[in-house]
Structure formats: C-alpha cells, structure tokens
Amino acid sequence: MPADRLDLAALIAERGSERYELNARYLNPQLPRMLHAIGFDRYYERAEGPYFYDAEGNEYLDMLAGFGIFALGRHHPVVRAAVHQVMDLGLPDLTRFDCSPLPGLLAEQLLSYTPGLDRVFFGNSGTEAVETALKFARCATGRPRILYCDHAFHGLTAGSLSVNGEGGFRRGFGPLLPDTAIPLGDLGALAKELKKGDVAALIVEPIQGKGVHAVPPGRLLAVQQLLHEHRALLICDEVQTGIGRTGDFFAYQHEEGVQPDLVCAAKALSGGYVPIGATLGKGWIFEKVYSSMDRVLVHSASFGSNAQAMAAGLATLHVLREERVVENAHRVGELFRARLAALVERYELLAEVRGRGLMIGIEFGRPKSLKLRTGWTALQAARKGLFAQMVVVPLLQRHRILTQVSGDHLEVIKLIPPLIITEREVDRFVDAFTEVMEDAHRGSGLMWDFGRTLVKQAVGSRP
C-alpha cells in the first residue's frame, strides 16, 4: 500500500516558526547569526513575481532575485504549469540507455540564440557548468592551465574554486588546480601567460558579479583574438549575466564579433523551479571529449537532463520570447540606471552607478565634507564595506526592499532584480534609495547609530 500523504502545509504551519533555530542547529550556524546581526531575520510566508509577503501581508520588493535565479520572478504560472505537466506525464526519466526528446529540444532552442556554438552539456548548477568548461578546455587543447581574472567568481567546487579570484573563498581548501589570475581586460598580462605555451583557456565573466565591473569596450574581442592566436580557448561564464540579464540573451553578445568557444549558463534557465546548468560549446570541442564509444560517459551528471529541469528550461525560454523579457530588461535597465545616475551629483557619498540591463552596481565613495568624512573613515577603518551594508539595512527595515552588497569588503550594492520589473518597481526603489541617501547625508541619526553598531561587530569578529 502507498504511504500516507505527506502534509507539507501542516508541517510548515507546525514547525515554520523554528526556521532559524533549525538552521542554527543542523545547517550553517553562521547564517542565522549573520541575519540576526543585520536585522534580516524576517519570516517570509509566500512570494509572487518580484515580491515577498510576510504573515501580516506586508509586501517586500525583491532586488536580488535569489542572486539571479528568479529572472521571471517567483512562481511564474507558465513555468509552474510546465513542471506540473511533466510530472503528470509519468515519463521514463533518466533511464541512462535511451535518448529523451526534451534535452535535445532545449539544446536546440538554446543554440538558436548562440550562432557558432553547436552542442550542449546539461548539469545541475552554475559551478557544474564551469567545471564542465574547464575539463572540456583541457581535453580539447591538451594543456593544463586555465587563466582567470582578479575578483572573478565562478563557483565553489574544487575546479571552479581554482579560478575564483576572491581569496576568502579559496582559503583553507587548497591545493587547487594550476591556474593563474590576471587583471580584467589586461591584454599585456594575457599575452605574457600565453607565451608560456601551457594555457588551455581564459575564463571570464563579461560583467563581473563582484563589483559589477564590465570588460572594457572592445577588449573582449581582442582577448578572443589573442587567445586563438595561441591556440587557447575563450570561456564566457554567463551563469549570472546570461539568459537576458544584461539586455542581450548573453552578455558577450553586446560586443560585435565575439564568439566564445564555451559558454556557461545556469540560474535563470531554471525558471526558479528546478536546478539546471548548461555548458554550450563548439562541436569540435565536444568531439575531442567524446572521441569514441569507449568515452561515451567520460563526463556526465547523475541528474543532468532530467525531465523536470528540461521542462522548466523550455518553459523559461518560451516566456522570454512571448513576454519579450529580454527587451524589457534592456528598456527598464536603461531607465533604472539613468534614474540612479542622476543622483550621483546630488549626493557626495554616491560615487558611481554602472552596469548593463538589469545588472546594476551602486558604488559609494569617500565624501568631501568633514562631518561625513569622519564617519566614513571610522567605518573604513573597522571594515571596508560597512557603509554599503549601512544602506542595505534601512532599505529592508524601513522600505521593505531586499538587496545586498556586491561582495565582501566592497562599498557596492548590486541590483539584480527579476527581469519582469516595470517602472513601478523602479520608482519604488529610487524613492526609497533617495530617502536613505538623504538620511545618510545628515551625518547623524538612526542610520549612523547602526553604522557604529556594525563597527563594534566588525572589530569584535576579528581573529
């Protein structure tokens, strides 16, 4: 007899109030501690589109999109229906010894956006997509070394961690792969490494998630040409920038003539429902990896190409086309950046607004006036990045807008909202951000009191 039905709604109703205690006891003990310290320990009950709701029905605007996963917002009805439908079909999924139609159909549609690429490998995450690209590049070129850029983020598994440009993530997990960091867009540094003859590829984010720094205009094409002259490959990590985030389907397509050898995608392709990673590449690279029937399973993933993920991916691409989501990201992103950039001259603590599409970085900098400079200097002495955190907190606590700093020790807030937002959400954020900036420039009050609390916590947490 089948087991009794699991009543998830009743379980959540009974135990949901224990969420932070359960996490502290059984999962990452530092997460609830951190959330409590900055006042982010909220109890969200449901979500729809670009909004969360708490038990009292208060509406919170999401400017993080799960770090880019929820490009279509949460619970898009088309994706949700597709996932339900594929489960109801009862397909013979993951038999291992047949060819399901869904992976081929999704690969066909993905490749239609990327002329020059021929094949796809499906895994389960962005870091797996990067791992696949690293392995394929080494196999195809017969060379061991991968170059990456300072401040890059490509994932946290061992291979992808080897090309992670943030030392804090790498510390304690070595030794890693023999890879080398170069400055973003530095052709001289690239040429120097390529002359050594052992470089398989350079992996690069067209716009880095950490700090929202883009490869300088025209430089990606020059990088590609230099790599190919030395028979090395260009890998574009589009895990966060891809699937419409920057106003193009992939961010590398912003620069005419760029044609990567391998492209990594994930996050938004999931539709927010089922994890998926995709590595797109040139046919000859795949043929080098899968060179004979003996090597048919030389690289695989246990849950790769599963029916639920493929259905979510197909539904996501359908929504992107039918609702013109990429075009919306371009149009609303231009408006959003223009509205924020107009504030730079108005507020001395605001240094720069940059980005492309709906991937926007707001950077803060040292003020000119003595009163503000004193507070800024105190924060910087305790820990760089505290001022940005000081802005993030009132955005949530006063205005119910969720966002976060762009990386550790950075005075940058990164906005990566769902790509379906409209002028209404832009207005709401800009109005709230303006109010927070007004408060910050008074040089006193609750915001600076909270800053002093952050200073004490930062100093107290030093080893």
Image: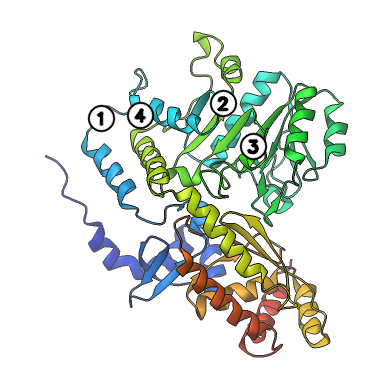
What whole-number distance in Å separates the C-alpha atoms at marks 3 and 1? 34 Å
Q: Residues within 10 Å of mark 2 (few under 14, many from 20)?
A: many
Determine whether, in the image, residue 51 is placed left or right of residue 170.
Answer: left
- Label 4 Cα neighbours within 10 Å, binned few <14 / some 14-19 / many ≥20: some
Disc 2 and disc 1: Cα gap in Å? 29 Å
User: Which residue occupies the foreground of this view, 132 or 21?
Assistant: 132
Q: Residue at x 63, y 69 (%)?
A: 340
Asked if residue 406 lies left or right of residue 68, the reply is right
Q: Secondary structure at mark 2?
A: loop
Where, by quadrant of the figure, is residue 354 drawn?
A: bottom right
Q: Mark 4 vs mark 2: give the one in front.
A: 2
Residue 149 screen position, x and y as percent: 75, 43
Among the two numbered marks 3 and 1 on one chain, the one whose residue lies closer to the N terminus: 1
Q: Nearer the viewer, mark 2 or mark 3?
A: 2
Residue that numbered label 4 is attached to: 102
Question: Mark 4: which amino acid?
Answer: Leu
Q: In x, y percent, where is residue 126?
A: 54, 41
Q: For the residues carrying marks 2 and 1, which lies nearer the camera in this image? A: 2
Q: Label 1 vs label 4: CA separation?
A: 11 Å
Residue under label 1, please give it.
91
Task: Identify the residue under disc 3.
Answer: 236
Numbered disc total? 4
Work out whether residue 191 can be spotted.
yes
For the residues labelled 4 and 2, say whether their Cβ atoms are less than 8 Å apart: no
Q: Earlier in the sequence, mark 3 or mark 4?
A: 4
Q: Which residue is mark 2?
A: 117
Residue 296 at what x, y percent from top left? 49, 15
